[in-house]
Amino acid sequence: MDLQARIDELEVENASLRVRVVELNEQVASLVGKVADLERLLGRNSSNSSKPPSSDAGAAKTNRPENANRAARRALARKQGKQPGAPGSTLCRVGDPDVVLTHRPDRCRGCEGPLDDAELVGVSSRQVFDVPDPIVVVTEHRVERRRCVCGCVTAGEFPPEASAPACYGPSIKAHALYLMCAQHLPRERCAQALADLFGVAVSTGTLDNWMREAAGALVGFLATLTAQLTAAPVVHADETSVRSAKTALWVHVCCTALLTLLHVGRRDKATIEAGPLRSYAGTIVHDRLAMYFNYGTAHVLCNAHILRSLNELVANHHHQDWAQGFIELIIDTKKRVDAARADGKPALSAHQQRRIRKRWDDLCDQAARAAPPPVPGTYLYGTNKDARLLAVALGEHRDLLLAYTRDLTLPFDNNQAERDLRMIKLQAKISGEFRSPTGAARFAAIRSYISTNRKQHQPIHRHLENLYTPTGAWLPTPTT
């Protein structure tokens, strides 16, 4: 009887231990996944992810291969700095200088005699480019009242810029707007810069009012910009997150080489449809975000994103071979496209395209074997999860990633959109988070105006000044 009781007791204890083993195995699997994810995050830098080079740790910069710090540079196989044959620039003299100063020698360097009446035998000149000390010019507008012979008194009208007994004019407002939205100065530092440069005391509240006034003047510009982007044959699209108080905002960009439209919202369908993509019927270049596939009639995927992801896998011996093979294939394909474009060809030859697709499919098969789907009931973590997702994407989107080989007018990457969005991250880095979604939307509108002006080589300060005058916003001319 004692033996049977002991057996029953051990069976109960054994069952309890089995349950505990299952629980511990689940905890271990969860912890292994977390460790893999943390190792993956710690191993990311500008060479294998979308992180900027400025965020790299010292070791990452030291150990980074010279030709692997940027995916685009790897694709072009070029080194840093000015490229051979690239045009240079220098400060050129002008034919009609504003001020001419003549410097005459007083005495002869040989006999030390006076040279007042000496013969002039030659003149050499040098030009110094500088700006005068900035000063504030106060203009007083006086409105006269005149009495007609009929007895009626009529007064003149103040110009639009004279909106108060004492107020700042369009030029100083344009300077402030440029400092805040083009050079990303915070409000306090902008006010300090205006005081140091021009000797004017402006409060941060006044600067906010100037931002609101400028954004209100851009309604027509944004409508024109949206219409022109809707009519463009190819546009780039991307998005990035910013903070506003305790909420997350998303800044979306739709752009071309000559146009930039930034708008603020969420990472959802409603925000995308608030921009030009709602009724867009052309080709969209993007980074595989699923929502973008619902718009446009054709798609081109960014190869720079793929190169960064592949570069992260190269460090893993299990995925090194196929990842390195894809990197070499993509870089070689890019070189072939560049050569064909330089020769004026519309596309790669059919033979070259077949060879590239064949090599691509072989590497996809190799990737599928190295990164198989998880066994039912289990999960993939860390690098293995990334490798599996990338292998599937490379197989499913082959034709979209190679679209630029069939039409050489299409881009290799989505760097145009990333460049236009980078200023949003720079704004957050320098000035911190936005105070409200409304403030973020105003900044996005003004930044769209500045970026489009710069792309089309327009006088930015003059056009910012026009926002505060009856002239109004400059409107870009159609580019299609």
Image (spheres, rainbow, N blue to C red):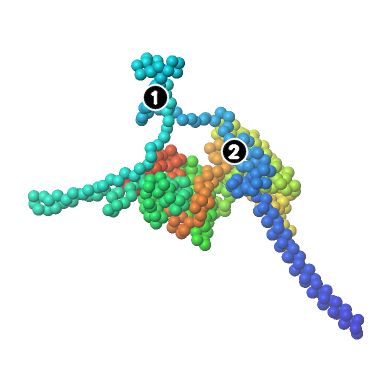
Residue plotted at (53% across, 44% down): 419
Residue 428, x across and y down, in percent: 51, 52
Q: In the rendered image, which quarter contains the C terminus? A: top left
The amino acid type found where label 2 is placed reads Thr
Residue plotted at (50% across, 46% down): 420
Residue in front for this viewpoint, 156 or 267:
156
Relative to 464, is 119 above or below? above
Residue in front for this viewpoint, 111 or 1:
111
Q: Is residue 375 left or right of residue 400?
A: right
Residue 27, x across and y down, in percent: 73, 65
The amino acid type found where label 1 is placed reads His
For discs 2 and 1, the disc positioned in front in the rendered view: 1
Q: In the rendered image, which quarter contains the N terminus? A: bottom right
Residue 193, x across and y down, in percent: 43, 48
Residue plotted at (52% across, 57% down): 243
Badge 2 or badge 1: first in the primary sequence: 1
The numbered disc on residue 237 is none
Label 1, on which residue?
103
Residue 238, x across and y down, in percent: 53, 49
Label 2, on which residue?
405
Q: Is residue 421 left or right of residue 334?
A: left
Q: What is the spatial separation of the Cα atoms under label 2 and label 1, in whole angstroms?
A: 63 Å
Give the number of marks. 2
Extreme-front residue of the structure = 112
Circle 2 Cα neighbour tier, 10 Å, few/some/many (<14 / 14–19 / ≥20): many
Per the image, label 2 sits on a secondary structure element best described as helix
Assess whether mark 1 and mark 2 are in contact (beta carbons under 8 angstroms): no
